[in-house]
Image (cartoon, rainbow, N blue to C red):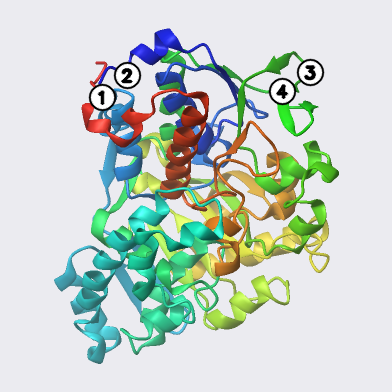
């Protein structure tokens, strides 16, 4: 099949709002199909929450640091003629991450089943063998759910597709992720070890649906990867490829207003120009962009009131620290679980208070990638899950004290001297996520992923409230997390191209798309 014909036959214009990972992936695919694509980005660099923070020779990922399940993005790259691992060299981490527990004990998590069983035996001898059963069962579960995660959901009727009905026995909607894991592990620390990944969705494992046990499985089955230079390098290279395919990327140019004819979006305006198009892809934060730009009366399903009532994920308090020397005994990824994890989660999701004993994550990327810091120095990226914006927390008043509390807590993983070694420091609070990055309520993982806000109950990839508008990113189906955000770009690109009458077969058959190099 000659997909290059599309470049000659199509002169359809598409505007992509936002140069985050979903927007860049969509731009690549739409341009390869022959569309005239323009990307408008409010920040001065590409990537959105996958951009970088750079100063004094230090380089940090702004948001995601775990690169998981490269299959989806590898197929997207291949479909437009590139090889992901050649374009963005990556290292698979031998120790995926270290888990330390406030109640005592630790796990150096690895895909080596025997090594994991030896560590599990030290924590809970009766749970030896459960890890292998967990992997075997979730291998089947992922196979059942892949067709669901890779297809659009437009109405309740889609729930009766054969692929969905086939997956029903594995859904167990009455069971939380924690309850699902308790079927395998008796030790509460192991339940958390294989359930904390719910935080990738901004949720508690005690509230998250059981089907998301596949998140932990993906780490062990497909590995945890570090792109050389950081995860932001993936977005930087995607932007380069998009430009090579003819995409025009305008940085530091936020959309200020939109033009409508009835319910159809016809153009967007920035301070610099007016951009008319046949179709528009919104990769901005869904709730923030819609409530700021689209008249409330035009949004029948996703009105301001409807959005206000939705459940949103937690937020994150971030510290980016450039330090003298290094912590060579600290692995690349480190997760510390607070002594009373359920109380910590309650403070984040229910009482909306700042914890005195928070769980936290530290990335010590320089042990893998010395290029991220000047000679003799290293970087530490610190993330603390916290409540999204709430009247109970005044970050202007409480931010400094919470920063000090976080640094104190880092002694629990061997960083007790951190204050004396800081040469560079940058901070992001939930207020910053909203004000500087345009994230509704500072909810960095978007709409929560409870069963009432998934599939057809999430904003549609072909947005139902406006004609000519399509969505990519964590605010649409399938949801948050880099692999599914990339998947959203494939779903959305197929729908958009089909609606424009342009051949989209290359998306489903990346192996037939010739490499351009």
- Mark 4 or mark 1, earlier in chain: 4
Q: Residues within 10 Å of mark 4 (few under 14, many from 20)?
A: some
SS type, badge 1: loop
- Mark 1 or mark 3, earlier in chain: 3
- Nearer the camera: disc 3 or disc 2: 2
Tag 1 and tag 3, C-beta contact below 8 Å: no
Where's the C terminus, which quadrant?
top left
- Find residue 3 and name its label: 2
Tag 3 and tag 2, C-beta contact below 8 Å: no
Residue that carries the numbered disc 4 in the rendered image: 266
**Residue 98 in view, yes or no:** no
Q: CA distance from mark 1 to mark 2?
A: 8 Å
Q: Image height check: is 477 above or below 344?
A: above
- Nearer the camera: disc 1 or disc 3: 1
Tag 3 and tag 4, C-beta contact below 8 Å: no
Residue that carries the numbered disc 3 in the rendered image: 271
Residue at 61%, 82% in the rendered image = 343
- Nearer the camera: disc 1 or disc 2: 2
Q: CA distance from mark 3 to mark 2?
A: 36 Å
Tag 1 and tag 2, C-beta contact below 8 Å: yes
Residue 158: x and y, percent? Answer: 48, 57
Residue at 25%, 84% in the rendered image = 122
Q: Residues within 10 Å of mark 3 (few under 14, many from 20)?
A: few
Residue that carries the numbered disc 1 in the rendered image: 513
Q: Nearer the viewer, residue 494 or 286?
A: 494
SS type, badge 3: loop
- Residue 348 position by quadrant: bottom right
């Amino acid at each position: 099949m000659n997909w290059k014909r599309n470049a000659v036959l199509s002169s359809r214009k598409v505007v992509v709002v936002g140069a985050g990972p979903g927007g860049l992936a969509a731009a690549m695919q739409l341009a390869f199909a022959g569309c005239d694509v323009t990307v408008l980005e409010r920040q001065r660099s590409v990537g959105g929450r996958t951009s970088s923070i750079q100063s004094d020779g230090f380089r940090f990922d702004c948001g995601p640091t775990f690169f998981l399940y490269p299959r989806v993005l590898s197929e997207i790259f291949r479909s437009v003629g590139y090889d992901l691992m050649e374009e963005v060299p990556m290292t698979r981490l031998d120790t995926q991450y270290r888990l330390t527990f406030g109640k005592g004990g630790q796990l150096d998590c690895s895909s080596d089943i025997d090594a994991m069983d030896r560590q599990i035996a030290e924590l809970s001898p009766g749970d030896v063998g459960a890890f292998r059963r967990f992997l075997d069962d979730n291998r089947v579960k992922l196979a059942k759910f892949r067709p669901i995660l890779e297809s659009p959901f437009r109405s309740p009727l889609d729930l009766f597709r054969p692929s969905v009905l086939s997956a029903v026995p594995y859904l167990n909607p009455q069971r939380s992720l924690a309850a699902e894991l308790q079927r395998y592990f008796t030790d509460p620390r192991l339940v958390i070890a294989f359930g904390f990944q719910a935080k990738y969705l901004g949720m508690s494992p005690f509230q998250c649906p059981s089907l998301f046990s596949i998140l932990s499985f993906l780490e062990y089955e497909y590995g945890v990867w570090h792109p050389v230079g950081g995860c932001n390098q993936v977005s930087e290279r995607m932007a380069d490829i998009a430009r090579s395919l003819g995409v025009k990327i305008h940085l530091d140019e936020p959309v200020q207003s939109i033009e409508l004819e009835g319910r159809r979006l016809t153009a967007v305006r920035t301070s610099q120009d007016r951009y008319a198009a046949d179709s528009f892809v919104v990769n901005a934060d869904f709730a923030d962009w819609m409530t700021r730009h689209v008249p409330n009366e035009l949004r029948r399903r996703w009105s301001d009131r409807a959005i206000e009532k939705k459940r949103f994920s937690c937020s994150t308090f971030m510290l980016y620290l450039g330090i003298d020397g290094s912590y060579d005994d600290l692995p690349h990824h480190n997760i510390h679980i607070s002594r009373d994890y359920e109380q910590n989660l309650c403070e984040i999701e229910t009482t909306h208070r700042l914890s005195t004993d928070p769980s936290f994550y530290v990335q010590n990327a320089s042990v893998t990638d010395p290029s991220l810091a000047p000679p003799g120095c290293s970087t530490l990226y610190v993330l603390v899950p916290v409540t999204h914006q709430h009247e109970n927390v005044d970050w202007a008043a409480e931010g400094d004290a919470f920063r000090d509390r976080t640094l104190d807590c880092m002694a629990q993983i061997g960083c007790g001297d951190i204050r004396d070694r800081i040469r560079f420091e940058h901070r992001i609070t939930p207020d910053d996520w909203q004000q500087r990055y345009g994230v509704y309520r500072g909810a960095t993982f978007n709409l929560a992923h409870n069963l009432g806000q998934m599939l057809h109950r999430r904003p549609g990839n072909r947005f139902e409230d406006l004609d000519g508008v399509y969505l990519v990113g964590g605010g649409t189906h399938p949801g948050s997390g880099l692999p599914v955000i990339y998947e959203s770009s494939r779903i959305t690109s197929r729908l958009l191209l089909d609606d424009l009458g342009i051949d989209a077969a290359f998306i489903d058959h990346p192996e037939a798309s010739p490499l351009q190099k």
